[in-house]
Structures are given as structure tokens and as C-alpha cells.
């Protein structure tokens, strides 16, 4: 059974304000970022994006976007793992993305992490979640 931690952000939908005489203007997002700024911030967390047009459409039209991050608790977290995940999650959350973290405790047990002791694995998983929250 995998544990789930969800970071809840405010629900917001980016819309376009259209007038027959005026140029198309973007309605403000709760973050204060334009659609283009949100798109660029989302793109900054990865080297490549398979479907850039789809990402832009999601940011423009979808009221709630979910991102999933699964990890296998296997011991102490190293600084790069903790810091980079926090930076990237914060960037995406600022864009209005909601996160669901999946603690792959059964996978860790199958891979004999922490000696295959599920209680220890779950304790390490909770520790990792707390580090990211901090």
C-alpha cells in the first residue's frame, strides 16, 4: 500500500479576456504570473517537454493540474535530492499545479531496502516527506 501526501494549492483557471475592439489580454492568475511566465516556469524544471503545446493548453484551460512524484525510501536523503525536489515542487506549485507524492514503500520492500523491513521503510518515507515540507 503506497502512502500519499498532497500539497493543496488554490484552484485557479487562467482565462483570456476578449473584446471585439481590444487586443486579447490575459486575465490575472492568483500567482500574479501571466500564462507565458507560468509556462516558462514549468518548463524550467525539466530539460525537455514531450508536448509543449499540451502543457500550454493545460495551463491556460485546466482549472486544476496534478503532478505526481513517486519515490522509493531507501535511507537518508542527500542534500541535492532534498533541495532540488523542493525547488522544483515550489516552482510548479507557484504555477497552480497540485502535487501528489507517492511513497513507494512496497517497491522499497521488494528491493530489500532497509533490510526489507516495511516499518523502517515507512519511517524513512515519513522522514523524507517532512524534510521536503521544511
Image (spheres, rainbow, N blue to C red):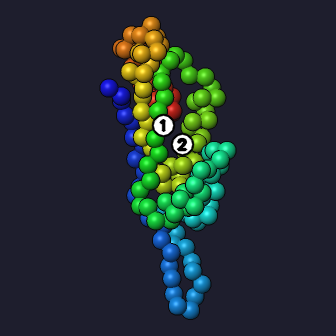
**Front position in the image: 110 or 129:** 110
**Which numbered disc covers residue 36?**
none
Number of on-image labels: 2
> Furthest residue to the bottom?
21
Helix, strand or loop at disc 1?
strand
Identify whether 36 is placed above or below 101.
below
Q: Residue at x 43, y 36 (%)?
A: 101
Mark nearest the camera among 2 and 1 is 1
Residue 100 picture location, percent across and down? 42, 40
> Furthest residue to the right?
47
Q: Residue at x 64, y 56 (%)?
A: 40
In the rendered structure, which disc, 2 or 1, sits on the residue that comes first in sequence? 1
Q: Is residue 59 visible?
A: no
> Furthest residue to the left?
1
Identify whether 88 is placed above or below 73.
below
> Furthest residue to the top?
115
Q: CA distance from mark 2 to mark 1?
A: 9 Å
- Answer few, some or many: residues within 10 Å of disc 1's Cα (few below 14, many 20 plus, some between 14 and 19): few
Q: Residue at x 62, y 45 (%)?
A: 45
Residue 23 picture location, percent across and down? 60, 84
Q: Residue at x 48, y 29 (%)?
A: 71
Residue 18 picture location, percent across and down? 51, 82
**Front position in the image: 127 or 66:** 66
Identify whether 44 is placed above or below 80.
below
Residue 73 picture location, percent across and down? 47, 21
Give yes or no for contact between labels 2 and 1 (Cβ–Cβ under 8 Å): yes
- Answer few, some or many: residues within 10 Å of disc 2's Cα (few below 14, many 20 plus, some between 14 and 19): many
Q: Quadrant of the N terminus?
A: top left
Q: Is residue 68 visible?
A: yes
Helix, strand or loop at disc 2?
helix
Identify residue for label 1.
69
Identify residue for label 2.
89
Amino acid at each position: 500500500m503506497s502512502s500519499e501526501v498532497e500539497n493543496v494549492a488554490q484552484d485557479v483557471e487562467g482565462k483570456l479576456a476578449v473584446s471585439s475592439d481590444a487586443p486579447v489580454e490575459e486575465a490575472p492568475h492568483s500567482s500574479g504570473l501571466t500564462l507565458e511566465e507560468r509556462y516558462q516556469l514549468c518548463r524550467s524544471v525539466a530539460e525537455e517537454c514531450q508536448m509543449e503545446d499540451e502543457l500550454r493548453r493545460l495551463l491556460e484551460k485546466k482549472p486544476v493540474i496534478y503532478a505526481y512524484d513517486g519515490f522509493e525510501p531507501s535511507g537518508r536523503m542527500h542534500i541535492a535530492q532534498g533541495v532540488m525536489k523542493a525547488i522544483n515542487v515550489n516552482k510548479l506549485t507557484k504555477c497552480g499545479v497540485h502535487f501528489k507524492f507517492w511513497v513507494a514503500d512496497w517497491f522499497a520492500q521488494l528491493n530489500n531496502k532497509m533490510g526489507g523491513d516495511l516499518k523502517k521503510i515507512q519511517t524513512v518515507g515519513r522522514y523524507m516527506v517532512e524534510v521536503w515540507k521544511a
